[in-house]
Amino acid sequence: MIEETLLEASEKMDKAVDVAKDDFATVRTGRANAAMFSKITVLYYGSPTPLQQLASFQNPEARTLLITPFDRSSLNDIERALRDSDLGANPSNDGNVIRVVLPELTQERRKEYVKLVRTKAEDAKISIRNIRRKAKDGIDKAVKDGDAGEDEGSRAEKELDSRTKSHTDTIDELLKRKETELLEV
């Protein structure tokens, strides 16, 4: 019972770290990359569809990205979604592809991105702590119901705390790397 609780908590914490990595990838650094567009949804035939499913991406230059829609009729919808996004890019449409040239990052904008990344990291840590709290409640319940002994419960709590610390340290390391990448000129 307790091992299952620990395993489930560990798996959920791994998923929280993966979500944080994905969130960090969507924050723009000096180079344009397709991961920045992973959270953008396009209204395609009346339903919101992820941009990644509607087009292919090419990166000819550091700050330029070419987006080629699979269906040319969705060109204007994709362009509208890009314009409405918070990327600060001005897409241009030549009838076949959409060219997105990202503006040069100013020092002020870089600092805004650092704040955004810190917020995303804190959200990930909060979700990890919530997972820990639920797992601890499960362990306490097992001890109270007599399914596990007190010693086993305290060992499981220590193991849970070490796993929690490991996952939050991973998030801190990812945050530090992303901040360095953002502030690099």
Image (cartoon, rainbow, N blue to C red):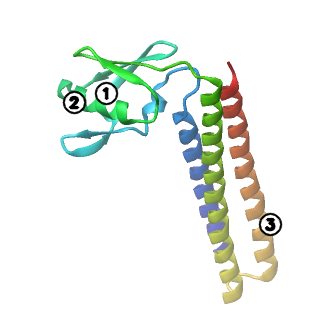
Residue at screen point 39% across, 38% down: 40
Task: Please name which of the two marks, 1 or 2, marks the residue nearer to the observer.
Answer: 2
> Where residue 142 sits in the image (x, y, percent)?
67, 81
SS at circle 3: helix
Judge the density around disc 3: few (<14), some (14-19), many (≥20) Cα neighbours within 10 Å: few
Badge number at residue 55: 1
Can residue 94 be seen by looking at this rendering? yes
Residue at screen point 20% across, 45% down: 46
Question: Which of the two labelled residues, at mark 1 and mark 3, occupies the earlier sequence position?
Answer: 1
**On the rendered structure, is 183 left or right of 88?**
right
Question: Which of the two labelled residues, at mark 3 and mark 2, occupies the earlier sequence position?
Answer: 2
Of residues 40 and 87, which is closer to you in this image?
A: 87
Q: Where's the N terminus, which quadrant?
A: bottom right
Q: Quadrant of residue 57?
A: top left
Extreme residue toward the top, this view = 60
Task: Give yes or no for contact between labels 1 and 2 (Cβ–Cβ under 8 Å).
Answer: yes
Extreme residue toward the bottom, this view = 145
> Where residue 83 sits in the image (x, y, percent)?
36, 30
Badge number at residue 90: none
Of residues 170 and 2, which is closer to you in this image?
A: 170
Q: Where's the C terminus, which quadrant?
A: top right
Q: Amino acid at mark 1?
A: Ala
Q: Which residue is mark 2?
A: 74
Badge number at residue 158: 3
Is 27 located above or below residue 3 in the figure?
Answer: above
SS at circle 1: strand
Q: Amino acid at mark 2?
A: Ser
Q: Amino acid at mark 3?
A: Lys
SS at circle 2: helix
Question: Which of the two labelled residues, at mark 1 and mark 2, occupies the earlier sequence position?
Answer: 1
> Where residue 39 sits in the image (x, y, percent)?
43, 40
